[in-house]
Amino acid sequence: MTSRNESIIQKIKGLLAIANDHKNDEECQTAFVMAQKLMIKYEISSSEILDQKSNETVSKGQVTAHKTLFWWERQLANVIADNFRVTWYYNSKTVEGESKKKRAIIFLGYENDIALAKEMYILAYEVLSFYVSQFVDEYYKVNLLQRERSLTTELKKSYIRGFLNGLNEKFEKQVKEMEQEYGLMVLLPTEVKQAYHEMFEGKNGLSFKLPPIEEVEAYQKGFHDGNKVDYTKTTLDEGSIV
């Protein structure tokens, strides 16, 4: 990895750490956008990186521990993979003393892309966990209701579906804007597609179902929180992210 690669990744890590420390709406949400914009800017502004793409090798990066994965962890992996030049799959293993297999999410892609995708996944995981808990607490407080397990579950599922859809829409819009401005398509590299195909040719992937949206208010709030980031071109200035 070049010193420039290391410098940019360290800037992104620092940016995400700030968001995690403060748990502030604007800072946490802006971290997603700033990190991805920096990633895309780096790809288009450094000719040496573009020239080195053919020499890069496809790598693997474990994102979660081996565990029983929630549906939303898998869906979050879809959102990140669709927007950060990686793909993903499960790695399964049997844990001693337990009958059911545990699974971990693994990203497949170029080393730098995996590093960025993992940082974004971890931040999104932590921010979403914080926001959904905050929303549920506020919902019961405002509506003067006693907590019920079934209602809490419905609220969380609907909010999380909204948040992930809002976050995905924000990423998609951002990528389109970057494509229009710089003419760069943020696509999964052909070598990564080939590697994935060779690993899983003839095998059926594990599917999962998204839960229904049962609480519209929770879904709408989640979508708003995942989609509300406002940003300007000044966020592309690397010097302002140190």
Image (tube, rainbow, N blue to C red):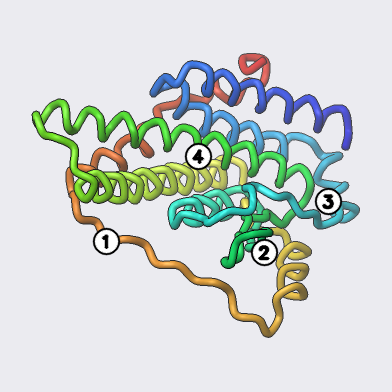
Name above or below for residue 12 compared with residue 105.
above
Residue 198 coordinates in the image, percent (x, y): 77, 75
In which quadrant of the rendered image does the N terminus lie? top right
The residue identified by callout 2 is: 94
Q: Nearer the viewer, mark 3 or mark 4?
A: 4
Q: Which residue is mark 4?
A: 125
Q: Earlier in the sequence, mark 2 or mark 1?
A: 2
What residue would you read off at disc 1?
212
Say left or right for 144 vs 33.
Answer: left
Percent x, y for residue 14?
Answer: 65, 21
> Looking at the image, is mark 3 or mark 4 earlier in the sequence?
3
Q: How many residues crowd mark 3 within 10 Å: few (<14), some (14–19), many (20+)?
A: few
At horizontal 36% and vertical 44% (from top left) the residue drawn is 166
For label 1, count other residues whose C-alpha is less than 10 Å away and answer few (under 14), some (14-19) or many (20+).
few
Kind of residue sitting beneath label 2:
Thr
Q: Please identify, in this view, whether the residue under mark 2 or under mark 1 is nearer the observer.
A: 2
Q: Residues within 10 Å of mark 4 (few under 14, many from 20)?
A: some
Give the label, 1 or 3, closer to the camera: 1
Of callouts 1 and 4, the N-terminal one: 4
Q: Earlier in the sequence, mark 1 or mark 3?
A: 3
